[in-house]
Image (cartoon, grey):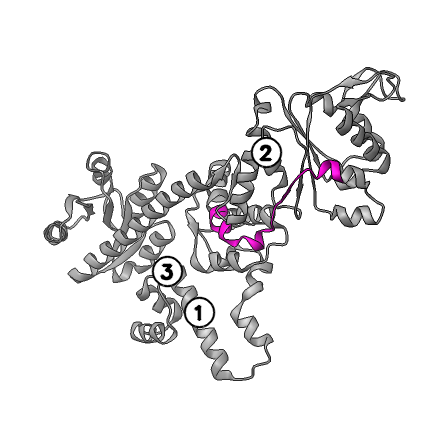
Amino acid sequence: MRRVLVVDDEENIRLVLKTLLKRHGYEVEVASNGEEALKLVDSFGPDFVLTDVRMPRMGGLDLLSTLRAKQRDATVIVMSAYGNLELALEAIKAGAYDYVQKPFKNDEVVLALRKAEEREALRRENRALREEIRKDFKFEDLLAKSERMQEIFRIIAKVADYKTTVLITGESGVGKELVAKAVHARSSRAARGKFVAVNCGAIPETLLESELFGHKRGAFTDASSDRRGLFEEADGGTLFLDEVGELSMPLQVKLLRVLQEDTIRRLGDNRDIKVDTRIVAATHRDLVAETKASRFREDLYYRLNVLPIHVPPLRERKEDIPLLIDHFLARNNARLGTSIRGVDAEARRLLLDYAWPGNVRELENTIERAMVLADGETISANDLPERIREARDPIKMQLASGELSIKKTSRIIEEVLIRRALQKTKGNRTRAAQVLEISHRALLYKIKEYGVTDL
């Protein structure tokens, strides 16, 4: 049985609501002000709080903010007399789900609670679904449900325990390093050696050889002591060579020797050092084209490309986007101390339609930016960068099409505004009509005409 806490300083209203809600199957407790309500919250554990805005000692707004500060999950619906409408709207901005205007009809109160129940049921379902998805589609630090990524998961599981070299290809930002880490984490090497990563394109060529192979004291001007290179650091484990296509020809020769003989030689040394290091390499370049252009050694390419894994761009696996959005929301909430609960329908549609040239990295940065800019608990289209909003703006698309019909363009603008108003008011048609400055009846007619669903 769902529990409702009614908070109002008028005894007759408390009595009417208690009788009404009990008749509709709710368990009800009442309080005459916010302070009294807070004492009941812990013991009664309400699912919903139906509170007046203006009350002595502690009003509805203070009660709402205290409940939010204490991280209570109860859904708050405020009641307000006509003259206090601005306070009710202020409560909505502060996190209340809805408001009921006094004097209210019994059906209005029950309808508001039923709508709140539907929303809470949807939230619980979404939370459960997210947990299921994470459980079913998480592979080490990789998160995906698309068949192409699932196939990559299967390949990683098969090849992880072999020392065979893996070459990971794909555009920048697709998660090549995460794939490399998954290969290492799934192998027995994870228990006896490190995962060491180096970006071959980020270190000057003059320093990269020493970084990879180490050096002896006196090998060059600043070599004041012996230094182990990354191959030795990763001995027993995995060395990830990111952007391996950026290696110079001399370093390509040295890498080929390591792959052939499992030995390295420090700069300035005359002896070889045996290493047991697995190589996982990655590149966004087309190494076949690079070999044909004589910029990459063909023999090294075949040594690296024993077990190829191609990570598809995000635009080719859009079914992974909702999963990644939820993951980045949860992670950033914990990291940033925010409490963003989700993405509204229009924003989600824009995120799904966008081509993501920067792939998963761009999506991650976009979600973090939107979370910082969001005013409420939900990311809206306005919180997204302009490049994403304009990628599929129906109004701009209509204007750019060359269509000169005022009638057709007006219909598109009307539909867009109605959708945005419903999203802004979380599906509350009465408030949406007020925002649009049209009558409630006109809004219902247009919703039916345009086939708009409550978002």
Which residue matches tag 1? Answer: 417
Please state the horizontal and vertical placement of residue 336, each as a whole percent of the image: 50, 38
Towards the viewer: 172 or 380 = 172
Q: Is residue 196 left or right of residue 137?
A: right
* Residue 217: % across, % down: 85, 15
Compute the Cα span from label 3 to label 2.
51 Å
Residue in view at x 23 percent, y 54 percent: 113
Q: CA distance from mark 1 to mark 3?
A: 12 Å
Q: Quadrant of residue 83?
A: bottom left
Q: Indicate left or right for 263 with 221 as reference.
A: left
Query: Does 453 appear above or below 178?
Result: below
- Would residue 374 be found to the left or right of residue 169 on screen? left
Give the residue drawn at x 57%, y 24%.
188
Q: Look at the image and say whether residue 310 sits in the magenta stretch.
A: yes
> Label 3 is placed on what type of residue?
Thr
Task: Tell which of 318 and 20 is nearer to you.
Answer: 318
Residue beneath disc 2: 159
The residue lying at 15 percent from left, 50 percent from top is: 10
Closest to the observer, 161 or 129:
161
Q: Is residue 103 visible?
A: no
Residue stretch in magenta: 302-325
Q: Callout 1: 10 Å neighbours few (<14), some, many (20+)?
A: some
Question: Which structural element holds mark 1?
Answer: helix
Q: Which residue is mark 3?
A: 425
* Residue 185 image label: none
